[in-house]
Image: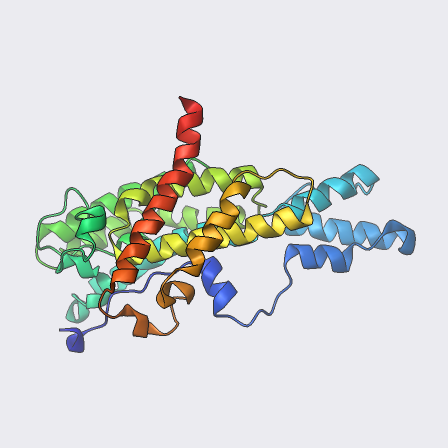
Amino acid sequence: MYAAGHPPLPPLDLGKFLDGTSNKHWMTLNEKWNKLAPPKSDIDQQLEKDRMNYLRIHLSANKSDHSDHSDHSDLEQTIQTHFRKTQQSRIGQWTANLNYHDLLDQQARAAVNWGDYALYDCAGCHQTLYKKIQGSVGSPRRVPGRPQGPLWAKPMLSSQGESQFKQLETLQDLIDEALNAKPFGDRGKIQAAIEGFASERSKADSQLIALASEPLDPIAADQWLRGFLQQRQGMLGNRSVATQTYWTLEMYFDDLANVSKANPRLEVKNQKFQARFQELKSQAPDFFQTGSYGDSAGLSALKPETTKFYEMLGGFIDEFLEVDSKASR
C-alpha cells in the first residue's frame, strides 16, 4: 500500500531538529550577550546603549532607553534564564498543526491527489503496537476503521500562554469530524472548515511570531511542559507521540542544565529530575536519539528492550507530574 503513496508524516520537534540535524549558523541569546555586552569599564557608554537596545528589541522587551546597572543586570538575568530549546519545541508544535492543515487544504483542492497516506496516522488502519503499555490510542469520537490525522500534530493547549490558540482546537475538532464522515475523510467538509477559520489561522501565525520573541523563563517553561505532558500522557501508545514527547523532554532538560550552569545560585524547579532523565536517555533506542530526518532503520519491529523503554518513559512522566499533584493535596 505504501508503494501507492507516502508514509505518514514523521514526528517533528523543532528544538530537536535544530539541535541535532542542522549546522548551527546563528548566535544564541547568551552568545549575543557575551559578544555585544562586555564589561562597562571597557566600553564607550553610547555603544553600550546601542548594544543594550539591540538586545531589548530582539527580546521584544522594554525598548525605552535606559542603561543603568539594574537594567543591565535584569536583561542579563532574562537572557541567562531563557529556555531556548523548550521555546522552540512549543512554537514548533503549533506550527506543525498549522502546516498540517495547509497540507490538508492543498490536498482537498486537488481531488486527484486526495487520500495520500501522508495525511493519516498509521493507527488509522492498524491497532497500536503498544496495547500492553497504554491501550488503544486515538480520538474517542473516531469511527473504527476510519483513518485519523497524525496525533503528534494535533494542537495541545497547555496551562501557560496558549489560550490565544483556542480556535485551532475547535478547527481540529471539525477536521476530525470530517475525517470520520466517510472512508479517508470528506475533503469538501475539510476544505470548508479550513476556509471558515482563515482569519483565526492568520492571527495564530502572527501570535506565534510574537510568542517566539518572548523569553521563556524557568517558571513558564515548567508550566508549559506540565500542561503538554498531561495531555500527551494518555497518548504514549502512539509511536510518533511518544517519540516527539521524548524529544521535548530532552530539549527541556538541556535547557535546565544550561540555565543551572549559568546561574549556580538559582534554584530551578525539576533539577532533581535532571540525573533521572539522563539515566533514561542512556537507555533510549537509537531512533529516539536522532532527529526526525535521521536514519529510519530503527523503525523496525518492536524489540523487548524497546517495549521496556516505552514503559520507562511513561513511568518517568507519571512521576514527574505526580510531584505537583502531591503538593496540591
Which quadrant, please, contains the N terminus? bottom left
- Percent coordinates x, y for residue 33 in the rendering: 72, 54
Q: Residue at x 56, y 51 (%)?
A: 255
Coloration mode: rainbow
Of residues 284 and 253, which is closer to you in this image?
Answer: 284
Instruction: Write the residue at 24% across / 66% down.
Output: 118
Image quadrant in which the C terminus is located? top left
Closer to the camera in the image, 211 or 1: 1
Q: Is residue 200 shown left or right of residue 35?
A: left
Q: Is residue 78 visible?
A: yes
Within the image, what quadrant is residue 241 found in?
A: bottom left
Residue 41 appears left or right of 316 = right
Question: Residue 5, position in %: x, y?
Answer: 19, 73
Count of labels in the image: 0
Name, please, the residue furthest toward the top: 329
Vertical placement of residue 219 versus 56, above or below: above
**Who's the residue at 55% across and 42% down the image?**
271
**In the displayed structure image, the side of residue 254 where residue 138 appears, left or right:** left
Residue 158 in view in this figure: no
x and y percent of residue 14 in the render?
A: 45, 59
Residue beneath the point at 36% across and 67% down = 287
Task: Name the foreground residue: 289 vs 118.
Answer: 289
Residue 202 in the image: state x and y as whole percent. Answer: 40, 50
